C-alpha cells in the first residue's frame, strides 16, 4: 500500500475520532457550529449523536487496525480492512450528500464540509492504494 494511501487512511481515522468526540461527548457544545442544530434540539438528538459518534470511532478503529496489519507485514489482511472501511466511509459521505440535498436536517447545501471531511480521505486511499 502506498505511503499516500496510508497517510490518507490515518487522516480519515483522525477525522472520525474527532467526530466521535464531538458527537458522543461534546454535542451540547458543538451542536450549532458543527451540526447546525439549535440548543433546544440537543436533548432530542443526544442519544442519536452518542450512537453515531461511536459508529465513527469503530470506523476509525478499523482503519487503524488495517494500517497496523499492513505495517506489521500482513499486507493482504491490512489492505482488505483498509479498503473495506474506506469504501464504507466513502458510501457514508454519499449518503450524507444525498441527505443534505433532501434537506433532511437543515437547509440544502449546508453539509458539504462534512461530506468532504468524511469522503475525500477514503477516496484518496482508494485511488492511491
Image (spheres, rainbow, N blue to C red):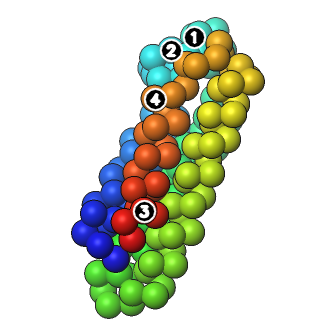
Label 1 or label 2, whichever comes before in sequence order: 2
| Up-down relation of residue 118 to residue 97 (above or below) | below
| Residue at image point 51% right, 28% down | 112
Question: Regarding mark 4 in the picture, which secondary structure is present there?
Answer: helix
To which residue does mark 3 refer? 127
CA distance separating discs 4 and 2: 14 Å
Residue in the foreground of this view, choosing between 45 and 13: 13
Label 3 or label 4, whichever comes before in sequence order: 4
Q: Going by the image, does 102 lie left or right of 128?
A: right
- Dot label at residue 32: 2
Residue 74 appears in the picture as rendered = yes
State if disc 4 and disc 3 touch (CB < 8 Å). no
| Up-down relation of residue 30 to residue 120 (above or below) | above
The 10 Å Cα crowd at callout 2, few under 14, some 14 to 19, many 20 or more, is: some
Residue 27 appears in the picture as rendered = no
CA distance separating discs 1 and 2: 7 Å
To which residue does mark 4 refer? 113
Q: Going by the image, does 72 lie left or right of 20?
A: left
- Can you give x and y, in whole percent of width and height, for residue 44 in the image? 71, 22
- Can you give x and y, in whole percent of width and height, for residue 117 in the image? 43, 39
Which of discs 3 and 1 lies nearer the camera? The answer is: 3
To which residue does mark 1 refer? 39
Q: Quadrant of the C terminus?
A: bottom left
State if disc 2 and disc 4 touch (CB < 8 Å). no
CA distance separating discs 3 and 2: 34 Å
CA distance separating discs 3 and 1: 40 Å
Question: Regarding mark 1 in the picture, which secondary structure is present there?
Answer: helix
Amino acid at each position: 500500500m502506498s505511503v499516500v494511501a496510508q497517510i490518507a487512511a490515518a487522516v480519515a481515522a483522525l477525522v472520525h475520532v474527532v467526530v466521535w468526540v464531538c458527537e458522543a461527548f461534546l454535542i451540547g457544545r458543538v451542536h450549532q457550529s458543527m451540526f447546525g442544530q439549535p440548543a433546544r434540539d440537543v436533548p432530542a438528538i443526544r442519544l442519536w449523536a452518542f450512537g453515531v459518534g461511536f459508529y465513527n470511532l469503530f470506523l476509525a478503529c478499523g482503519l487503524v487496525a488495517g494500517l497496523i496489519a499492513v505495517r506489521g507485514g500482513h499486507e493482504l489482511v491490512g489492505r482488505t480492512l483498509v479498503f473495506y472501511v474506506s469504501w464504507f466511509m466513502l458510501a457514508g459521505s454519499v449518503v450524507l450528500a444525498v441527505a443534505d440535498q433532501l434537506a433532511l436536517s437543515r437547509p440544502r447545501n449546508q453539509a458539504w464540509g462534512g461530506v468532504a471531511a468524511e469522503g475525500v480521505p477514503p477516496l484518496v486511499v482508494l485511488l492511491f492504494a
